[in-house]
Amino acid sequence: MQARPLRGRSAEMTTALSVVRSTSRHGSSAAILLSGPAGIGKTALLSAVCHEAVSTGMTVLRGKCDPIEQVWPGAPVLALLRSGRDEVCTRQEYERITRLVDEPLVLAEAVAACLDAAARRRPVLIALDDVQWADRVSAFILRNLVPRLVGLPVVWAFAGRSDQDAAEWFGSEPVHVERIRLAPLATADVLALAADRLGHAPDARTGDFLAAVEGNPFHAGQIIEEIARSAGRGELDAVPVAFAASVSALLGSLPQSSRELVEVVAAAGRPFALSEAAAPVGGNPGANLGPAVDAGLVVLRADSTVAFHHDLVREQVYSTIRAERLRELHRRLADHYLAAGDPLIAASHARAAAVPGDLDSATIMIAAAESLAAVSGEDAGDLVMAVLDIVRPDQPGWLDLSLRCLSVLCRVQWAAEAVVAADQILAHVDDSTLIGRVESDAARALWLGGRVGELLTRIERALRLDTVEPGVGVRLRAVHSLAGARLLDGQTAVGRALTVLDEARMSGDEQALALALEAAGHSARNDGRHQQALRYFRELARLNGRSLVAEEVIELQFLDRYEHAQTLLNQATAEAVRNHGERLPAVLAAQAWQDFNLGRLDDAEAGCQTLLEIGPRLGDAVYALDAVIVRVSSALLRGDVDSAATYLRVADEIEGADAVLREPGLTVMNGWIAAGRGDHETAREVLRPVIADVAERSACSYWPMWPCWMGLFFEIGDLAQDKEFMAAATKVTEQAAERNPGVASFEGVALLTRGRTEGDVRMIERGADVLTHSPRPLLRGFGAFSHGRALVEAGDRQTGLAQLDRAWDEYHGMGAWFYRALTQDMMRQAGARLGKWSAAALPPAAGWASLTQAERRVAMLIGAGSTNKAAASELGVSVNTIGTHLRSVFAKLGVRSRVQLANSLHEESL
C-alpha cells in the first residue's frame, strides 16, 4: 500500500531533512528534537524523516521508549542496535553487550563502540520516540553517547512531549541542535487528511466533526477512520463526536472476552506477546483478538505482539478501567512476568497493584530492587521506599522484607533512607543481637554518606547492649574504629583500629575483619603511614576477593610509586567489565590525582570534568569533591585565580559529604586562592588551624600531609614572614618524612624546609638533590627554585641561575604558569634574559596554537582516523577523557566534524 502524504508538516520536514543532509554532506554531528502534545504527529514526522534518511543511504536505527517505568534498564537504547536493516552489531556482540547492563559506564562504551564503527561506514540516524518515558539507565547511556560520538556523522532524532525531554543530553556539546515544536494542523490540512483516507473531499458535516479536534492529527485520524468504517457498513451518519466517546463506544461494542484482552494490553503498557496472553487473560487470546482488531483498537504486529494504534488509545482505554479491576490486572501481569523470569517488569506491575499490607506485591518489588541495585541505584532505592510504605510491622514477613530493604539501601548508598529503614526496624525489635546487626548496617550507610558524628553516637549506644553476640559486638567495635578514622587524630585512631583488628582476627567473623581492615587502612593513611595503609587495603582486597584500585593507588602515589599506580589504573581500565559501574568514579578520581601529581594538568582537568558529569549520576558525589579540588589546584598552578574561585563554588552544590570530609581539602583551597591573590596574611590565617592540628598530631585527615601542600604551606608562611608558621610547616614535613622513609617527595621537602628555616644552603642543596628523584615535577621545580634562590642570595649567581632555569623548565613542562612567572621574575632580577621566555608566551584562545599538549595529541590521532577507543589505548587514558579533550579541540578549532578536523590537520601540516 502506498504511504499517504504527510500533511501540514512541509516546513518542519524541510528543517529536519536539512539537518540530515548536512550531516551526510559534512560528516558533523547534529540533533533534531521534536516536541509537542500527545497525538500531534511526532511519530508520523519521525517516520517520514527515517524513510527519507534510508533513501539517502543512511543507516537508520529506530526505537521507542515504554511507558512502563521499570522495564529492563537501558532496553530502548539496546534495542536500537538491532533495529535497522543494516546490522550495526552481530547477535553475539549484542548478547555480550546486554550482559553489561549492570555496568552503566562500560555498557555506554560498548554501545558507543558499535555506533562509532557504524558511523565510520556511513552516516547514521538514531531515532528514538517517546523519550519522555526513557528509563534512567537509557538516559544515562544517551548522555554519555552524545559526547562520545561528537564529530561523527550521526543525527540524533528524539521525539517527546516536552521541549526538555532530551535537551539536557546535549548541554554544551559541539552538536548542532534543531528544535521543532509541532503546532496543531491547519483546518485545510485536516480536511486533506480526510480526503486522502476517504477518497473524496469530506462533506460539511464531517468537516464540523473534524473542526472539533482543534488540529490534533491523531484525533482527526480516529474520526476519519470511524467515518470510513461506518461508510463501509453503510452507516453514513454514525460519526462519534469526540475521541473519548469513540474509544468508549468501540470498547463497549466488544464481547466480554475481547474487552478483557484489550484491557490487559492497556495495563501492560507495552506490546504484549499473544503467545503469553493466555496466563493473564485466560481463554483463547487468538480467538478473542479478532473483534478488537476489527474495531480498530489494537493491531497484531509482525512479531506476533498485540499493540495499540497509538498511545492515546491505550491511555483512553486505561482510564476507563475501574480502580479495583485495574489492580487485579496489574496483579495478574506481575504474576505472569515473575513466572516468565522478568522480575523488573513484574515489579512495575506489582507496584501499580499494591495496597497497604500487600506482602505479595512487596516481595516481588524487593526482589526487583535487589536485581536493580547494581544497575540503577536510583530505581532500586525508589522501589525499596515503596516497599517500606506497603509493609506493616504486624505482618509475619515484615521483618525479613525490612532487612532486605535496609541491605539494598546500603548497597546503593542511600544513607538517609537507610537510617530511616534501620530506625523503623529498631523501633519494633528487642533482640540485642539483631539490634547490633541493624546498627552495623546503618553505620555503614552513615559512613558512606559522610554522617560520621551520627554514626559514632548510634554505635556507642549499641555497644552499651550487654547481650549482643560476640561476633556482632566485634563488628560494632570495628565500625566504631572506622568512625574514629575520620574523627580522631591519626595516632589515636591507629591504636584503636589495631586493637579491634586483633579482636576481629580472633573472632573469625569476616564482616568484622573487613570493617577492621578498612578502619586500619584509613587510620594509617590519616596518620601519614602509607606503607602500613597499603598493606591493610591489600589484605582487605584479598579478603573481599576484589581489587581496591582507588585505595591502593592513593597509597602508591604517596609512596612515589607512580609507575605501579599507573599499572593498577591501566588494569582497571582494561578489565572494566569486571568492575561494577558504581566503583568506577573512585578509579577516575585516582587517575585524576595521578595525572595532576605527574604534571599532566590538561589530562587531569579532562578527567575531572568527566567525574563531575558522571559521579553524581552514579551516586558517588563524594568523588566530585576530588574533582573540584584538582580543578581548583590546576587553575591556581596556571595562575587563573578567578577560575579557581569559580570552580571552588561548585563544591557548594555537591551533596553527599559532611564537613569532616569537605573541610580539610576545601580549606586548603581557600587558603591557596587567597595566596594567589597576593593576600598572604589571610592565606596564613585560613591555613593556621590546619597546619597546627597536624603539627600537634591532632589532625584527623591526611589532606595537609600531601607533599605538594606542605611545600605550599611553607611558602605562604615565608611570604607572610611568619617564622612560627614556617616552623610548624617544617615540623609537619619532618613528621611525614619520618613515617615514610625512603620516599623522595617526603624526604626532599623536609630537608628543604629545614634548610630554608635555618638558612643552611648545604641542606637546601641536599633537599633539592633528593627531589630530583621525585616523580612529581612540581616538587622537582620547588627543589630547584629553592636551591637556585638560596645560591643567588649567597652570591653564587651563575650556579643559582642554572638551578632557577631548571625550575623554569619543570614549571613550563607541566603548564604551571604561575610558578614559571615567579621563577622568571627572580631570574630577571638576577640579570638573566633568555630567548625561550619570549617563545613561551601564554597560548592564544583559539587555533592550533591554543591546544594543550594532550589536546594536540588527541587531535592528531582523531584527525588521522583513530577511534576514541583506539586513541584512549594509544595515550593510556580513558575514553571519557578523549571525549572531553575532543570537545575542547572542536571548540578551539571551530570545527564540527572529524572530517573538518582532518582537513584542518592537513592544512596545519602544510
Image: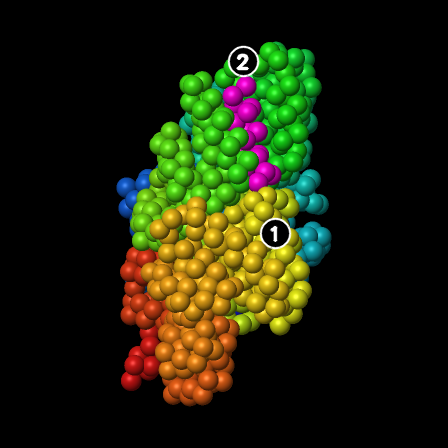
Residue 771 shows in this picture: yes
Q: Residue at x 61, y 68 (%)?
A: 721
What residue sits right under mark 2 in the picture? 469
Disc 1 residue type (three-letter): Ala
The magenta region covers 473-489
The kind of secondary structure element at disc 1 is helix
Q: Residues within 10 Å of mark 1 (few under 14, many from 20)?
A: some
| 821 in relation to 171, above or below | below
**Residue 761: % across, % down:** 43, 69
Left or right of 562 on screen, residue 300: right
Residue 396 within the segment the image draws in magenta = no
Q: Which mark is residue 692?
A: 1
Instruction: Give the prevailing secondary structure in the magenta stretch.
Output: helix
Q: Residue at x 48, y 24 (%)?
A: 512
Disc 2 residue type (three-letter): Glu
**Residue 697: % across, % down:** 56, 45
> How much space separates mark 1 and mark 2, taking CA atoms?
42 Å
